[in-house]
Image (spheres, grey):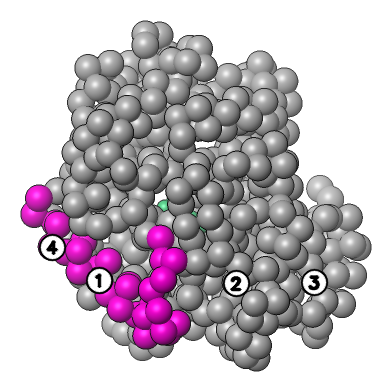
Amino acid sequence: MESLPPILRLGHLKDVALFQEHVRSLGLTIPSDSRLLTGVDSPLTHPLSRGGIQIGNRIAVHPMEGWDGTADGNPTEHTIHRWKKFGRSGAKLIWGGEAVAVSHAGRANPNQLVIAKHTLDGLARLRRALIEEHRRTTGSTDGLFIGLQLTHSGRYSRPDTHDKPEPYIVYHHPILDRKLGLSSDYPLLSDGEIDAIIEEFHCAAKMAQELGFDFVDIKHCHGYLGHEFLSAYTRGGKYGGSFENRTRFLREIAKGIRSLAPGLHIGVRLSAFDTIPFRPDPSRSLNGKTGPGIPELHDTLIPYVWGFGVNPQHPTEVDLSETIQFLSLLEELDIRLVNITGGSPYWNPHIQRPALYPPSDGYQPPEDPLAGVALHMKVARQLKQLFPNLIIVGSAYSYLQDFLPHVAQAAVRDGWVDAVGLGRTILTYPEILWDATLGSEIQHKRVCRTFSDCTTAPRNGLPSGCYPLDSYYKNSELAERLKMAKAKR
Ligand SMILES: Cc1cc2nc3c(=O)[nH]c(=O)nc-3n(C[C@H](O)[C@H](O)[C@H](O)COP(=O)(O)O)c2cc1C
């Protein structure tokens, strides 16, 4: 079997010219500026005003969950630690904070936050901590626009114990059902149960508005419930089959929010493209190390009708036709805020969060992780060109490491996206773009190197965080427990 060429570590590249040459040598298109601009000259500092939404700059923080809430869905000190980082980033667009479940049943893990009467004080505390830290870092809260990501985890619900899935599925998926051990008679969510979940989103949005959030994100990504609806081609009834039926979930949620929480903005984080679920190649695992990812067998599954944003004839290829239809629908619904992501951390982490080191439930990278970054950027750019009136936020920049500021500056300046979202880098070096706009030296020692412990820890029932670089985790007893969990594997 042919082995993959070694992946060049970006930390070994001494300057941006070498990075640019490296990107070219891989045959990829990733824009980057050779010189970082500061102050008002930097496109990253330019305010954004569209459709009544005012955002103070072009830096966004993605939702970053911590698996560190209490059993009843309230935040802990760990959660506050993370939300302070969101504020310290200098980003004026806080996209959701983190996934907050609209009900106990919809939690992806027993430590996920929940929005309910008994958690309102806790959520208010998080928002206050973020705002305070933002003020401390930047001197002002002008133009700060904060959302809350609302979720139901659907197929990936595990509300009670971290190792006991309690899936709510919309249709039977030939690969994912097998991965989750679901039999062909495992019950689907009924239309009536879906109607009830929609009402939970309405109540949650109303509460978010009362808490002072500027918008709610109706999460449609990463394999959770909203995303699963978009590929419910094989489902009967009012929530499956046609595009209209598959988007009814979103439309009904938006309608209810407009009437119950007028004035609250709505956003959608969307897995705009996908591919077949991947698994480690068993023929290439070596010395206990998993092999590189390969797509699950799918020869007998063509046309492939279980993925959104994939080509049904060649499902490892992207097809944006329905994604484009979906963004047109968002425009019709006056939903302006769109955060473009792709795939799922459960079935193709190399797409969703490109990394050099895989998480414990992943596989070695099947391609240079820069290919995943380039794909995200290409898709976001295509959609931005087609929808100039939407506010498009791009994802998957953390793998760019020391060159993140150069790429972010070019992407915003050239109109590939309206704002650059920061995910994993927030856990270790939240101010990376803010520092760049101030002309401060980039602190290389704090740059996220994509070790994936932030995913491996929660896969082992521990809170997320940057264990290698953030002393808050590095020096805690949690780090010892993570080490033990990794040694057992
Ligand atoms: C530890 C961790 C927690 C995450 N939590 C969420 C979440 O709550 N909601 C969400 O939409 N995405 C979540 N993501 C995905 C990130 O928002 C982001 O899309 C991904 O990490 C890629 O961006 P990056 O390259 O900047 O890390 C999470 C990712 C990680 C690693």
Local crowd size for mark 4, using a 10 Å CA cut-off: few (<14), some (14–19), many (≥20): few
What residue is pinned by disc 2?
45
Compared with 401, 254 (above or below) is above
Task: Give the label on residue 33, or none.
Answer: 3
Q: Secondary structure at mark 3?
A: loop
Q: CA distance from mark 1 to mark 2?
A: 23 Å
Is-magenta flag for residue 144?
Answer: yes
**Is tag 1's residue or tag 3's residue first in the polypeptide sequence?**
3
Q: Secondary structure at mark 4?
A: helix
Residue drawn at (73%, 73%) of the image? 406
What residue is pinned by disc 4?
121
Percent position of residue 471, x then y: 40, 87
Q: Secondary structure at mark 2?
A: helix
Report the amino acid beneath label 3: Asp
What residue is pinned by disc 1?
128
Local crowd size for mark 3, using a 10 Å CA cut-off: few (<14), some (14–19), many (≥20): some
Residue drawn at (20%, 64%) of the image? 124
Find out whether the residues at labels 3 and 2 contact each other: C-beta distance under 8 Å: no
In front: 282, or 273? 273
Where is residue 296, by image quadrant?
top right
Where is residue 25, by image quadrant?
bottom right
Find out whether the residues at labels 1 and 3 contact each other: C-beta distance under 8 Å: no
Residue drawn at (45%, 42%) of the image? 268
Report the amino acid beneath label 1: Arg
For the C terminus, give its image quadrant: bottom left
Is-magenta flag for residue 168?
Answer: no
Report the amino acid beneath label 2: Thr
Q: Is residue 215 left or right of residue 341?
A: left
Instruction: Give the magenta range.
Output: 117-145
Report the amino acid beneath label 4: Asp
Q: Secondary structure at mark 1?
A: helix
